[in-house]
Each structure stands twice: as structure tokens, then as C-alpha cells.
Amino acid sequence: MDTPDPLASDVVVRNLRPSDLDAVIRLDAKNVGRRRDEFFELKLKYALSNTGITVSLAAEHDGAFVGFLLAQVFYGEFGVTERVAVMDVIDVHPDFRGHHVAAALLDQLRTNLLGLGIHVLRTEVDWDNTDLLGFFRREGFTMAQRLCLDLDLEGSRR
Ligand SMILES: CC(C)(COP(=O)(O)OP(=O)(O)OC[C@H]1O[C@@H](n2cnc3c(N)ncnc32)[C@H](O)[C@@H]1OP(=O)(O)O)[C@@H](O)C(=O)NCCC(=O)NCCS
């Protein structure tokens, strides 16, 4: 029989707050190896200005900030009329991985989105981020029926 994970049961998921900015930046820097201050200042400001749309979440263990995710709701993009949510970032502190912290964040996000009548969560992941890819696959994400394209604006000049 599986033994319950005591850490997992002590994890609390709550809405992200503006005062979490510094904790978000520090935790993300641990995972990506550099601070992304400007990126998160903008992202958090935008995400949290949509009051009532609780799609950016934090995970705490014993009052410590151990993980977060940032998502946004889009009301039709690229000609698609359905409302979809897009998850920009998910990060779990390295010392707290493997205890279903990310799964708990995703579960709460699922509940909140379904409550808003949104049935699709979309995300992008770097091809070589095998860590995230493995997690997304385990959680049920599949390849979308769309291709993401980049154009080098300088290099493609005629
Ligand atoms: C990927 C990540 C979010 C997973 O967090 P976590 O809290 O350790 O994941 P969980 O414990 O909730 O895992 C949930 C399930 O996914 C599985 N899983 C987790 N990471 C996995 C991986 N790399 N490959 C395959 N499966 C994985 C777990 O085994 C678990 O499966 P189970 O339900 O059968 O036990 C975490 O490792 C992380 O933050 N990585 C860095 C992400 C990053 O680069 N973020 C910045 C850019 S967005």
C-alpha cells in the first residue's frame, strides 16, 4: 500500500498576491539560473489586475513559498473564438519537488478554470526542457493541433 506523503498534505494552495513578487523572482531564479525581474513585474501586474479571475496561484508549506504558477485567460486569439487559459510559468522550489506541489497547483487551477467555464489550458515549453515536458505529459497535456512559428525579422528581410 502507498504511504501518504506528509509534505504533500501540508501544502496549501492560495491565490498569488502582489506581495509575492520577490518570492516569485527568487524561486524562478533558482530554477532557470538567472533573475527575470522585469518579466515577472509585468506578468504579475497584468495577471493580478484581472481581479476575480483567480488563475495565478501560490503553494506554501509551513508558511514558506514553495511553488507558483502564472496563467491568463484569453477571450479568442488567432481567430479562435473559444475562451482558453494559457499557463506562462510553473515553478516548484528544488527542495520541494516530487511531493505533488505542482500537481496541487494544477488541480486548483483546473477547478478555478472549470468554474469560469474554461475547458482548455494551453502552454508552451522549450523543446529541451525535459523536466517540464515529462511533468506535462504525466499530467495529461498532449501536443496541440497547431504549430508555433517564429520569424527572424532581420534575417528574413529581402
Ligand atoms: C516540473 C516541475 C514543475 C514538477 O514539480 P513537482 O512538484 O516536483 O511535480 P509533482 O510532484 O507535482 O509531480 C506530479 C506527477 O508528475 C510526475 N513528474 C514530475 N516531474 C516529472 C518529470 N520531470 N518527468 C516525468 N514525470 C514527472 C511525478 O512523478 C508525479 O507523478 P505521480 O502522480 O505518478 O506521482 C518542477 O520540477 C519544476 O519546477 N521544474 C522547473 C520548471 C521550470 O523550468 N520552470 C521555469 C519555466 S516555466
Image (cartoon, rainbow, N blue to C red):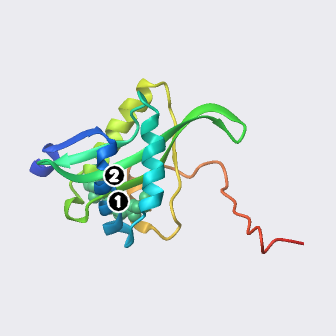
Q: Which residue is identified by label 1?
A: 25
Residue toward you, 40 or 32: 40
- Horizontal side of residue 141 vs 146, given as left or right: left
Q: Give whichever of 140, 85 is nearer the camera.
A: 85
- The quadrant holding residue 52 is top left
Residue 38, position in %: x, y?
Answer: 46, 59
Return the mark for residue 21: 2
The residue positioned 30% from the left and 62% from the top of the image is 26
Q: Residue at x 77, y 72 (%)?
A: 154
Residue at x-position 74% and y-position 65%: 151
At label 2, which amino acid type do we have? Leu
Q: Are marks 2 and 1 in contact (CB under 8 Å)?
A: yes
Quadrant containing ligand 1 reads bottom left
* Residue 149 placement (x, y as % from top left): 69, 60
Q: Secondary structure at mark 1?
A: helix
Task: Say which amino acid is labelled 1.
Answer: Ile
